[in-house]
Amino acid sequence: MYIPDTIGIERQKFFTREREFNNFTSLTEEDIAQIKADATDFVNRTKSHYETPYWQSTLYERVLEFINHQKRNSYYNTFDKKVIFLILALDPDLLMYKIYLSNGNDDKEYNKMLSVVGINDSKILRYEEIFFNHFLKDKTIIKGVKLNQVASLMSYTEFIKSFKSITDEKYESLCALAKKWLEENIYDEYNTTLSTAIYNIMAQHKLLGLNSLQEQFCFFILLIDPNLELLKIYEEESRIDNIKSRIKERFSFYHHDLIRVEKLYHERFCPDLEISPWQL
């Protein structure tokens, strides 16, 4: 990111206080409402004096100057409050973070941030992610995610020993939830469905009512492989390279332990489902 010298100096001064960051743990919803009101008022007052073709860059500089020299207002006495003020003044809808999620690891995301938001500061993006996860992830389901987090979810398969903790009633509710999710998340690309499902399951499990790792993986299977195709491929093939190839072609990823998890799922919820060509 190119940053003019005048902004760069103030930016460097501000972020030297990063070591004081406390992950927003001491802030309340009332604090957020107060900071949002202050940030909105500041933007409105600043815009009336400094509206230019490069308004967002000018605003960034003015916000940095303001929060770096807040000595009279004792309310803004922590880095946490100041960085939230910065976010809510420059990107109140967290568009940078949403663009990051919707574009995955594509380098073009930063150009899109610049064109949509007016800035593409990676440091602010980092704090937007923490802010979202702390205050907003349990309020609104995020859609259209392309950020690939398959490996992160699969790293937890080893902790799935059975699905016996999920009652029949809970399973029925998970089936209904999966049906509703699939109706509300229709994408042209399978990978978007996969990435969105994993993000919702991992980051927003409380909002979905997924109360355990077992429920998270059960829900994942209901969304991505309700007919246990992965397990069927495993049973149909005798060579591991064929198994990997077919599973990757169908699901875009392969993780050996997910086969074991699907076996547990099959045993608990649908033992009568035929998964093997040799099954009588």
Image: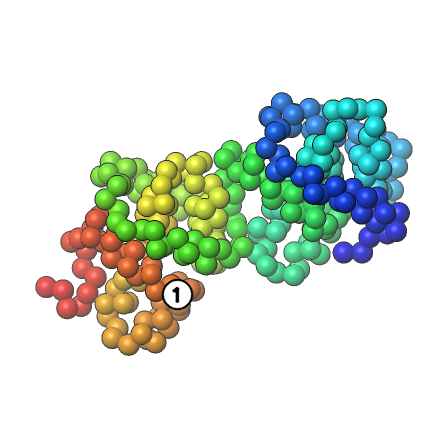
Q: Position of residue 11 (x, y in %)?
A: 80, 45
Which quadrant of the figure has residue 83? top right
Which quadrant of the figure has residue 69? top right
Q: Position of residue 88 (x, y in %)?
A: 70, 35
Instruction: Kindly tell me whether residue 185 is visible in this rendering.
Output: no
**Vertically, is 244 above or below 219?**
below
Instruction: Kindly tell me whether residue 237 is visible in this rendering.
Output: yes
Amino acid tagged 1? Tyr
The residue that appears at 71% across and 36% down in the rendered structure is 79
Q: Is residue 266 left or right of residue 1?
A: left
Q: Position of residue 157 (x, y in %)?
A: 36, 55
Q: Is residue 18 left or right of residue 9?
A: left
The residue that appears at 21% across and 49% down in the rendered structure is 268
Give the farthest residue toward the left.
280
The kind of secondary structure element at disc 1 is loop
**Vertically, is 64 above or below 278?**
above
Q: According to the image, what is the colour scheme of the structure?
A: rainbow
The residue that appears at 15% across and 53% down in the rendered structure is 272
Q: Position of residue 18 (x, y in %)?
A: 71, 43
The residue that appears at 24% across and 70% down in the rendered structure is 236
**Vertically, is 91 above or below 264?**
above
How would you rate the neighbour count of disc 1 (Cα within 10 Å): few for under 14, some for 14-19, many for 20 or more? many
Mark 1, residue position? 254
Q: Viewer-proximal residue, 60 or 17? A: 17
